[in-house]
């Protein structure tokens, strides 16, 4: 017997009192019937009219947008970006909130995830509850920091205009200026020209160098357009659907600067998108680990070698660093970037596969910067068995961080200190660095 089809509630409107912030850029509310709503474009304590964007009768929760603000929060501002708001660009979550309020909301999310998933209070995590703005981001309400050095624009297939995806949608919101894009990206003029036949255009403006990179992904069968940009680029590449790359001109990488070193980052590879992020995170990790001369270290999910290079500088010629990274091109870049260190080795593969094969049974310090899903129980259990005196965990997702901190606690580690950084203003994203140490100090 087939189940009765459920009625869609999309478009239904409810007048609700907005409750606390939730992980993901929305707040929690309930209808008069007790139905849970995840409401975007709202702030805690407001009374709003929420219009359902996803969900059906009997669903565990509904998604909705606040389309009318009946009783605004004192933290509310008029969204500076003309493309923000219900049904518009999904790149930012908190354009309607004052900068200080955004950081408080992110702090509340971190605290809630720590409590729910790790059983930790902020005090137990060595955290004072604050989320620190990046240097240069302390702007008045109504102004937007231009921080994003890497922007991937989607291209509307009908108009050929570049834009950004709408929230939880493949639809493109054409924009003529992204307010959070860094000046080096904006200067390229991606939004001011058409891109017929292209599926996406990625623009990169490196930090600490004048390198700019544009990566085009064409739709099947499309011809490369005549590209005229407002500023020169160090490399213009076209990525074909079969994975092949046609380099139109220039070198296939950009040069980034952090911790006094230059790092090669190729093929649109991963690098922190805020210009101050790499230095801020290296500082936090090094202050937490305090690597000593002659120590051994692991850098897991090491990318192009940012933390491995910083640790190698500090442990000296008598120390040793092993980095593990799954991306082939990132490993090539890391080996190039760290070639001057005789005692640094970079292995390619997934951490959970490579680490057991190394035969390493003991290490002094560890840094891990896993993807958004976190490291997971198996990897954490292995790391906890290596007896490191300090572990630095860099996390872009507070839920994954909290889960893994819970696993570390099971493995005999406690959080010594946690710091949170607002490296993604106007969005719900936040970066954390947790420093762990054994509950029982090793002799």
Image (tube, rainbow, N blue to C red):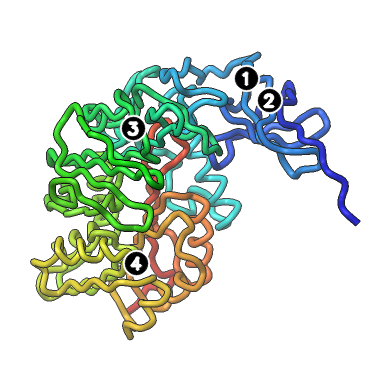
Sequence-first disc among 1 and 3: 1
Above or below, 195 against 433 in this view is above
Determine which residue is flagged by label 3: 195
**Which residue appears at 57% of the width and 19% of the height?**
73
The local crowd at label 1, few if under 14, some if 14 to 19, many if 20 or more residues have their Cα within 10 Å, is some
**Which residue appears at 28% of the width and 40% of the height?**
224
Q: Which mark is residue 67?
A: 1
Residues at marks 4 and 1, CA–CA distance in whole angstroms: 43 Å
Q: What element carries label 2?
A: strand
Q: Are marks 1 and 2 in contact (CB under 8 Å)?
A: yes
Q: Is mark 4 on a helix, strand or loop?
A: loop
Residues at marks 3 and 4, CA–CA distance in whole angstroms: 33 Å
Residue 340, quarter of picture: bottom left
Determine which residue is flagged by label 4: 326
Residue 169 horizontal/vertical position (percent): 55, 37
Determine which residue is flagged by label 2: 51
Residues at marks 1 and 2, CA–CA distance in whole angstroms: 6 Å
Sequence-first disc among 3 and 2: 2
- 55 vs 172, left or right, is right
């Amino acid at each position: 017997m087939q189940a009765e089809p459920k009625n869609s509630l999309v478009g239904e409107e409810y007048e609700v009192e907005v409750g606390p912030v939730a992980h993901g850029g929305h707040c929690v509310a309930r209808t008069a019937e007790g139905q849970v709503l995840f409401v975007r474009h709202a702030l805690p304590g407001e009374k709003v009219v929420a219009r359902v964007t996803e969900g059906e009768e009997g669903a565990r929760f509904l998604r909705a947008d606040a389309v009318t603000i009946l009783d605004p929060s004192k933290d509310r501002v008029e969204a500076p970006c003309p493309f923000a708001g219900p049904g518009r660009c999904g790149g930012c979550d908190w354009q309607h909130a004052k900068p200080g309020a955004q950081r408080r909301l992110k702090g509340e999310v971190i605290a809630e995830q720590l409590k729910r998933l790790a059983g930790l209070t902020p005090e137990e995590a060595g955290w004072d509850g604050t989320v620190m703005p990046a240097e240069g981001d302390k702007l008045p309400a109504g102004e937007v920091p231009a921080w994003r050095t890497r922007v991937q624009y989607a291209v509307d297939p009908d108009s050929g205009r570049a834009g950004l995806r709408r929230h939880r949608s493949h639809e493109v919101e054409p924009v003529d200026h992204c307010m959070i894009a860094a000046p080096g990206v904006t200067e390229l003029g991606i939004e001011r020209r058409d891109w017929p036949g292209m599926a996406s255009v990625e623009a990169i403006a490196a930090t600490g160098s004048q390198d700019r990179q544009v990566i085009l992904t064409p739709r099947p069968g499309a011809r490369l357009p005549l590209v005229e940009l407002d500023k020169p680029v160090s490399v213009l590449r076209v990525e074909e659907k079969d994975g092949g790359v046609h380099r139109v001109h220039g070198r296939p990488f950009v040069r980034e600067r952090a911790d006094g070193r230059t790092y090669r980052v190729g093929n649109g590879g991963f690098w922190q998108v805020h210009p101050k992020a790499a230095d801020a995170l290296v500082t936090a990790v090094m202050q937490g680990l305090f690597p000593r001369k002659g120590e051994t270290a692991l850098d897991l999910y090491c990318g192009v070698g940012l933390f491995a290079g910083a640790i190698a500088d500090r442990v000296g010629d008598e120390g040793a660093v092993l980095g593990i990274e799954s991306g082939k091109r990132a490993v090539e870049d890391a080996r190039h970037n760290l070639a001057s260190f005789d005692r640094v080795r970079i292995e390619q593969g997934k951490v959970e596969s490579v680490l057991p094969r190394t035969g390493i049974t003991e290490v002094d310090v560890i840094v891990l910067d896993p993807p958004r899903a976190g490291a997971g129980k198996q990897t954490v259990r292995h790391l906890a068995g290596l007896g490191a005196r300090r572990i630095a965990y860099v996390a872009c997702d507070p839920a994954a961080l909290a889960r893994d901190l819970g696993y570390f606690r099971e493995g005999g580690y406690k959080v010594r200190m946690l710091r949170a950084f607002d490296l993604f203003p106007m969005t719900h994203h936040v970066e954390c660095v947790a420093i762990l140490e054994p509950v029982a100090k090793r002799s």
